[in-house]
Image (cartoon, rainbow, N blue to C red):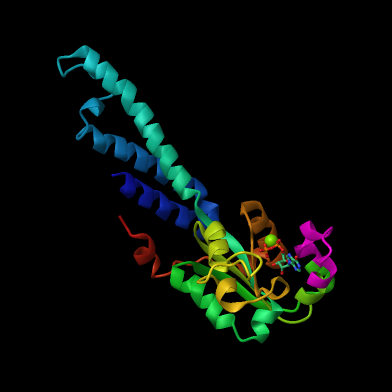
Amino acid sequence: MRSQICRSASRAARYLLSAPRQSSHVFAEGRAAAAAAAVSLRGKVPYLTSYGRTDSGNASIGWISGALALPAAAYMLQEQEAHAAEMERTFIAIKPDGVQRGLIAEIISRFERKGFKLVAIKIVVPSKGFAQKHYHDLKERPFFNGLCDFLSSGPVIAMVWEGEGVIKYGRKLIGATDPQKSEPGTIRGDLAVVVGRNIIHGSDGPETAKDEINLWFKPEELVNYTNNAEKWVYGEN
Ligand code: IDP
Ligand code: MG
């Protein structure tokens, strides 16, 4: 039952990302799912038989079941909203070294095969000023200038990927900043050798992801669509 609710919430979250203007419908759907779960559990769990009805012949059991049913429904609602929050978007860029080394398809395919969905992509040569904006949080570091020179030295593939947990898991796919420390099996671990040429960038958290997507893309460049594979990646029920 719990996994059913989670999947229902997950579908709702995917819908939310695909149709942002109709978000109230999603939450209505979420609450309906929790209510339905509580109703359905009433038949199966002895303590959740009614909301305070006393026609079972035992007034105290009826009262207890009523008292427990509401927290249970609230708990399930929290669970599904927590789960729904995992549907995310992240900013991923193949840096000039990855592009020049012919690794575009290799890198994209790792995200695609995992089950994440590409919702924006473009090739662009960022100006140095733009690179400085992108890496603004590193401006005090000694490598900042060289890093910005490098990012603006050639074409970058800028992308937005969508999926449950894609921000954190995208970083796992990418591997540690220094390829000498990246695990084999990760993009940097398999395909790069030194920190100054580590071929790929990925947002490091939800706030950064939002800021970086806004910096690199206009809202209309993000494409909302349902991928036919989604029902196989996430399940339908
Ligand atoms: P991240 O790309 O794994 O998020 P950050 O610490 O945000 O790593 O650094 C951004 C980029 O700056 C790195 O991907 C790497 O290209 C470069 N960088 C980080 N540390 C060093 C360093 O010590 N020397 C040279 N370049 C560095
Ligand atoms: Mg970073």
* Residue appearing at x 31%, y 49% in the figure: 4
Q: Can residue 19 be seen in this view?
A: no
Who is closer to the viewer here, 120 or 174?
174
Residue 87 image position (x, y, % from top left):
50, 55
Q: In which quarter of the image is the N terminus?
A: top left
Instruction: Let me know if residue 151 appears in the view.
Output: yes
Q: In this view, does 62 lie to the left or right of 162?
A: left
Residue 8 versus residue 91: which sits nearer the camera? 91
Above/below status of 53 relative to 73: above
Q: Which x, y percent locates residue 140? A: 84, 58
Is 192 left, or right, of 83 in this rendering?
Answer: right
Whether residue 140 is in magenta: the answer is yes
67 versus 23 height, above or below: above
Q: Is residue 233 left or right of residue 110?
A: left
Q: Of residues 144 and 22, which is closer to you in this image?
A: 144
Q: In which quarter of the image is residue 43?
A: top left
Where does the C terminus fall, quadrant-wise?
bottom left
Q: Give the range drawn in magenta.
A: 132-147
Residue at the far top in the pictured view = 59
* Count of numbered labels shown in the rendering: 0
Q: In which quarter of the image is ligand 1?
A: bottom right
The picture places residue 211, in percent across and down from the top left corner, at 69, 57
Q: Position of residue 13 (x, y in %)?
A: 46, 53
Secondary structure mostly seen in the magenta stretch:
helix
Image point 38% across, 28% down: which residue?
A: 71
